[in-house]
Amino acid sequence: MKVAASSLRKGFVVDMDGKLYVVLNVENIHPGKGTPVTQLNMRRISDGVKVSERYRTTETVERAFVDQRDHTFLYQDGEGYHFMNPESFDQLVASPEVIGDLGAYLAEGMVVQLSTHNDLPIALELPRTVTLEIVETEPSVKGQTASSSYKPAILSNGVRTMVPPYIAAGTRVIILTEDGSYQERAKD
């Protein structure tokens, strides 16, 4: 199905020259003079090559339809990341290239949206937030309350983030999966 290039969003799959690409980033550019354009950063599904394309907003691209279903993350090994469809109990293996940086936030038993095309995993969508524990952080310095200052912390999954000064090691916090930023202290 042909769609306007300006209507594409992150995670959409497009068909260009018979090859499938997953959209990684979309930027609509409106220069002061000239035609607005849409800059697409994409990854070719077959071999993982990243491609950057620029379209006029009026141009159309072929959108490929993918099957998007909930899957449960099971485990990771040398083959890749293993997921199970909770309805049919079919298992799929996604390569590390498909998962990318999101692999750090996967936890056993987590339900995620897995996009497949011809039973081949092509994209992953995590829940908006995850709850993780602070493993290591610097002690807060007394008197740093004049401005909202943040201090570095390492989460239980190894990711570094910035947290408010009152957060100590061992505290469970809610993290946004899209950028790894601190959201709030967990209420559990």
Image: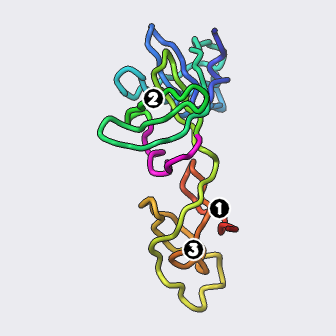
In front of the other: 138 or 148: 138
Q: Nearer the viewer, mark 1 or mark 3?
A: 3
Q: Does residue 27 appear in the picture of this structure?
A: no
Q: Badge 1 is on which residue?
A: 183
Eye-nearest disc, 3 or 2: 2
- Residue 101 placed where, x, y %? 44, 45
Residue 45 position in % (x across, y down) = 42, 23
Q: Quadrant of residue 43?
A: top left
Residue picked out by circle 2:
92
Say which residue label 3 marks: 171
Instruction: Measure the alpha-carbon separation of dots 3 and 2.
Output: 34 Å
Q: Position of residue 169 (x, y in %)?
A: 50, 77
Q: Residue at x 41, y 31 (%)?
A: 93
The boundaries of the magenta stretch are 99-111
Residue positioned 47% across, 76% down in the render: 137
Q: Residue at x 45, y 59 (%)?
A: 157
Q: Left or right: where does residue 56 sit relative to residue 51?
A: right
Side of 135 where 57 appears, left or right: right
**Quick one: SS at disc 3?**
loop
Of the numbered discs 2 and 1, the one sitting upstream in the chain is 2
Which quarter of the figure has residue 158? bottom left
Q: Is residue 109 magenta?
A: yes
Q: Amino acid at mark 1?
A: Gln
Number of numbered discs: 3
- The answer to whether residue 7 is above or below residue 166 is above
In the foreground, 45 or 114? 114
Mark 2, mark 1: which one is toward the viewer?
Answer: 2
